[in-house]
Amino acid sequence: MGGQYAFLMAIRSDQGIVLRGYSFGESDRIVVLLSPNNGKIRTVAKGVRKTKSRFGARLEPLTHVDLVLYEGRNLDTITQASIIAGFPKLRLDLDAVLAAGTMAEAVDKVAVEGEPSHRLFLLLLRGLTALENGARGHDLVTAFLLKLMDALGLAPALTRCASCGRGEHLNRFSLAGGGVICDSCDTGGTVRLRAGLTEYLTLLSGADLADLPESDEALSGEAVGVARRFVEYHIEAQLHSLALLDG
């Protein structure tokens, strides 16, 4: 009876969005997912690289899946996988794939194994859904990155000076200082922002990913540049997928 109980305890159900995967051994694959309840999880899919694998494309990156896992000492083994959402339309558009890759990469770099990640999971799911429904452009990525930092408690100050709280003459931006800086608090190491950029960033940070405001071509490129540098500075890692999107 005790052995049967231990077996039952070793099987669990979960869901997640596949962030990435890589080869393991001759025919297996490590699959890294973001789970709402368990954060970043690393699993192994046995035999998935064989042509007759029962998993097929169900564990491809950017797929929302339902899983049955056998808990192992170091890695959980996927025993069943079914697709909840495969986002087939976004996969047909290179810009959408690159944007989705940026979202997944950013989440992968900040998610913590074993810690609930409901906000990160829902944010990534909303971002992928927006792309599936036809949203495109730098503004979607900018809004996503700003919301990601907010979920981490690191949102940049955009409406008041990050140093003194003043709401006027916010012409500079400090990565280390945490956002916009007024002229009085500027001690160097800041960058001057184009007129209207802070307001544009504020607008995107509060917008629904599924209903973004009309894009301003004069500000859109600079906005994603500021968001990217801010995120990379605070997570201490580069977003390589975003570099491809810019290219």
Image (tube, helix red, strand yellow):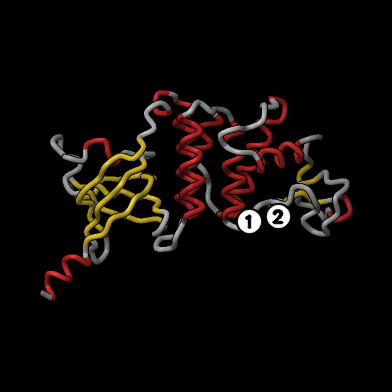
Residue at the location (66% across, 43% down)? 205
Quarter in which the C terminus is drawn: top right
Q: Which mark is residue 178?
A: 2
Q: Quadrant of residue 4?
A: bottom left
Tag in front: 1 or 2: 1
Residue at image x 48%, y 44%?
124
Please give left or right for residue 221 compared with residue 55 in the image: right
Find residue 181 and report its horizontal and vertical position in percent: 80, 51
Q: Residue at x 40, y 60 (%)?
A: 113
Quadrant of the rendered structure where residue 196 is? top right
In which quadrant will I find the N terminus?
Answer: bottom left
Image location of residue 237, percent across then percent down: 53, 51
Up-down relation of residue 237 to residue 212 (above or below): below
Relative depth, front residue between 90 and 208:
208
Labels in figure, total = 2
Is the residue 115 above or below the residue 26 in the image?
Answer: below
Looking at the image, residue 63 sits to the left or right of residue 149; the answer is left
Residue at numbered disc 1: 154
- Between residue 106 and residue 69, name the one nearer to us: 69
Question: Sequence-wise, which precedes: disc 1 or disc 2?
Answer: 1
Q: Amino acid at mark 2?
A: Gly
CA separation, marks 1 and 2?
8 Å
